[in-house]
Amino acid sequence: MIGLGSERMLARKKKTSLAVIVLAALLYAPTTFGFSITFFDATRQGSEFRITMAADLSLTENVIEALQSNIDIAIRVQVKIYRIRENFWDDLVVDTKIDYTLSNSNIFRGYSVRSSDRKLDRVYDSLSAALDAVGSERTYKIVVPEKQSDESDARYRGKCRIFLDRSKLPSLVSTTVYFNNSWKRNSGWIEFEL
Amino acid sequence: MSEIRSRVEQIVPLVLTFAAMATVLLTLVFSAVSTFSLEYFEDNLAFIYLLNAISIVVLGTFIAIYIRRFWVRLKARVAGTHLAIRFLRTFAVVALLSLGVIYCFTYFSIRGLISGWVEKQVKDTVSEASQLQKSFLDVFKERIVLDLTEYVEQLKTTDNVDDIPRIVFDARISGDFEEITYFSDPGSPTGILASSAESLRVESLVPLNPSNKLIGGMLSGEDKLNKKPTIEIFNLADEGLMLRLLIPVRRVDSSSYHYLQVIQKLSKSSENLAEQISAVEARYNRLIFLRKPIQINFLLTLTLIMLVVLLFSIWIVMKVSNRLVQPIQALSEGTREVAAGNYERLLPVTTKDDLGGLVESFNNMTKKIKTSQEKIEEQRSFLEVVLQNLSSGVIFIDNTTSASSINLAAASILDISVERFKNRSLEGAIKSYPQLEPLLSPIQNGILADQNEWNGSVAINSEQGAKILTYSATRIQAEKKELVSYVVVIEDITDLVQAQRFEAWTEVAKKYSHELLNPLQPIRLAVDRIKVKTDTNLSDDVSRTLERAFKAIDRQLDALIRIAKSMKEYANLPEDFYVEPFDINELISDSIIFHFDGDDRVQVEKDFAPDLPPIKADPSLMLQVMNNVLINARDAGRDCEKLIIRIETKFIEPDSIKLKFVDNGPGFNQTMLDNAFGLFESTKPDKGSGLGLSIVKKIIDEHGGEIEVANNPDGGAEITIMLKLGHSYVSG
């Protein structure tokens, strides 16, 4: 027979266990939100890397509302390449970022997309078309600086991701978006070794 | 080094305080200025938050330090801490209430203000932008449609396909359009019937297709059967903004539609206008969206500013209250030091307000107490000196029956140590000095009986011999005070009593020696006559009986005559003094020869100091002293098989001679020790008159000397005589 005190104790233990599980779940939660890389390929020729990727991008209502309210949304493709070293930590040799700025065009009544590498600058009739354009298969050529690649037998590893860059949002919004999961759009890192 | 350290300890808090105040001031000013402009506020939001956070951390640290200080002082019961905390608490409550009211008022005001401000702006902007853009495009559309009416009509009716490029070309030329394309199906690349473009750029070789939005827009509105011209703006790479108009051309021969797309480059002014409209609309949209974040950020900033103000106020109040209670703390410490007897410390008067006046009054009070204390101390010292110089013994006893003070005379009379006796209860003193019990017990009883005055005389035994003391105890109570103490005055009257006794005995001796001697001489003559006249024919028994009787009478008469003579001698001593210098060693040697020469039973050991200076005294009386002392020794040691008498003479600086007589006899009993120089005190019941030592004492006294009797630690009697070399005495 369990007394009232024991029941309360059991209930408290259950609550504690639940809290621990939730905390653990938060800590080890997947870092992928909304964006996913659908195709990825990486090749290397000497110090030159070719990263080909395609992504499926979807935005939440909050982000779409902000976009339609003429808040520019920055989607960033980031590629990091490390030179593998035996007895030391791996040396970061390249950290490339390509930004795609998605904005609402009031004049053209559509969505414009501009990339920081100037390879894309178009207005699309619909948001899905604009997102498709950003996520479409594209190859990025990355060259490791000579100083970093003087060893011919050097081995490299890298990682790549595409995410919504919240730091580019207006500062007034940034105080709230950092605590709002609907603004977390991140494919998570895809790692490779060459 | 320590000076530099103390300087640093003074400067560092000041610098930190100024830095903190500057940070807070900067935060408040910057935050306030930032709210004047939304753009400025947005641009510096992160900095505002950072400044506020720094201020909060700095102020929080200062407050934590002060709270810790208050806590430590509270634990240490530092005076004024409670007052400071109460002051702080009151202010904190008042500040919280005030700031709370201000906060609530500001919160609702800002919220309403931002909402209203945004709403109004948005409405105005939207209305203007929509109207402008619509009007702008409608004007363009209508003008172009009007300009092309003739050509549209031609396209509606023409059956000759070859005429279509010409009509299209003419139409483009007529309106100076950038490009005109005639479609049978605008969604398909094969649906182009004819096209004419002005420029020869590569892009113009292939006509531009209308957008889906433009195609779909022809069926918008209430009339879904009749398609209407639609217009849009688009950006052509390297060319800038373009207008694209899609005009439905309903064929006369059928109900199907063909479409005429007209592309017209916007003029620079129109382009600017369109961009401005777009910018206004974008701003409108942004404002609508940012309304809530603006509110949140403004209110967050307000909250932070309020928090900074509150913390700043609390910090300032802590400092102020700390400063306010400093004089109180100083007063408390000063009071404690005064209570501990330190009247030297004067408190610094740092302010000229009421507290400063209080500190000044305290300093005056301390000075007056110091002056009074010095006077009391002076009087006490004077009294102490008087007491110490009194020949009478004085003991002060407090209400706990402890001896609070004792003068040197009392210590000398009672033969005690001042340090051991002082501050001890009478009970404890009796335990330590049992010989004082006859004196201290009646004093204690009087105190316990709460008597006001009592006195008495007691005899005590001290190492110096028996003493007769008188005491007089008096209760002392200050007027209207509860403090009670007792003063006991003690007098040693031993010498007085002895002198009185000697005086009395001298008188008795004078009177009775004469009275005794007078009848004794005739009695002796009568007895001698009876002896002569006694019949010689008496029987042997009677003769023997008479002979024994006569012998007994002779012995008794001898004894009586000897006593009577001794008494006469004692009584007449001072009358026949003759002083001359003589060698005391020689005198003692003469006496020894006279008494012990040829007596093998007695051995005299002489330890005479050589070169002893001559002494001025009456040689015959001194010879009598030596005779009496030696006879006493011989008589006392009559039972000794071998009587050893050791005689020592010694010069004592500066002007005295010490004579010491030690024998190996039985010594003095306690009664003799207590009253060695009393009349008729003798250990020789059959032989002595009991006047020998009394006579010795009297002669020595009259010569200004001192005599002491004691028992030698190795056994036997010890008599010590101190004589002045050149004394002056007054003949009695």
Image: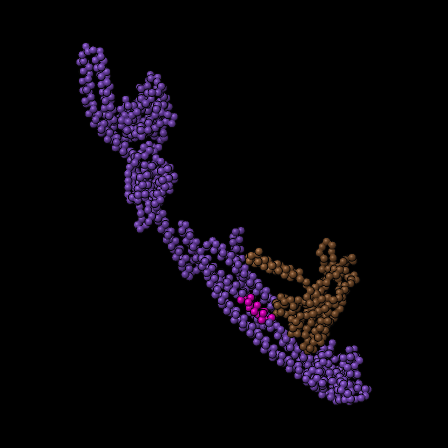
Chain colours: A brown, B purple
| Occupied quadrant, residue B419 | top left
Which residue is at the front of the view, B55 or B6?
B55
Number of numbered discs on residues = 0
The segment highlighted magenta reads B293-306
Residue A129: x percent and y percent? 72, 73
| Farthest-out residue, top | B537
Residue B260: x percent and y percent? 75, 84
- Residue B331, compared with residue B279, is above or below; it is above
Indicate left or right for B330 with B284 as reference. left
Q: Quadrant of the C terminus of chain B?
A: top left
Residue B390 appears in the rendering = no
Residue B362 appears in the rendering = yes
Which residue is at the front of the view, B496 or A18?
A18
Q: What residue is at 23 percent from the left and 22 percent from the top? A: B560
Indicate left or right for B315 with B390 as reference. right
- Residue B483, compared with residue B217, is above or below; it is above
| Occupied quadrant, residue B592 | top left
Indicate left or right for B145 with B703 as reference. right
Q: Is residue B636 magenta?
A: no
Indicate left or right for B256 with B34 as reference. right
Main SS of residues in magenta? helix
Q: Is residue B301 magenta?
A: yes
| Farthest-out residue, front | A1
Residue A55: x percent and y percent? 73, 68
Q: What residue is at 51 percent from the left and 56 percent from the top? A: B68
Which residue is at the front of the view, B113 or B564?
B113
Residue B581: x percent and y percent? 30, 26
- Residue A6, compared with residue B497, is above or below; it is below
Q: What residue is at 65 percent from the left and 73 percent from the top? A: A65
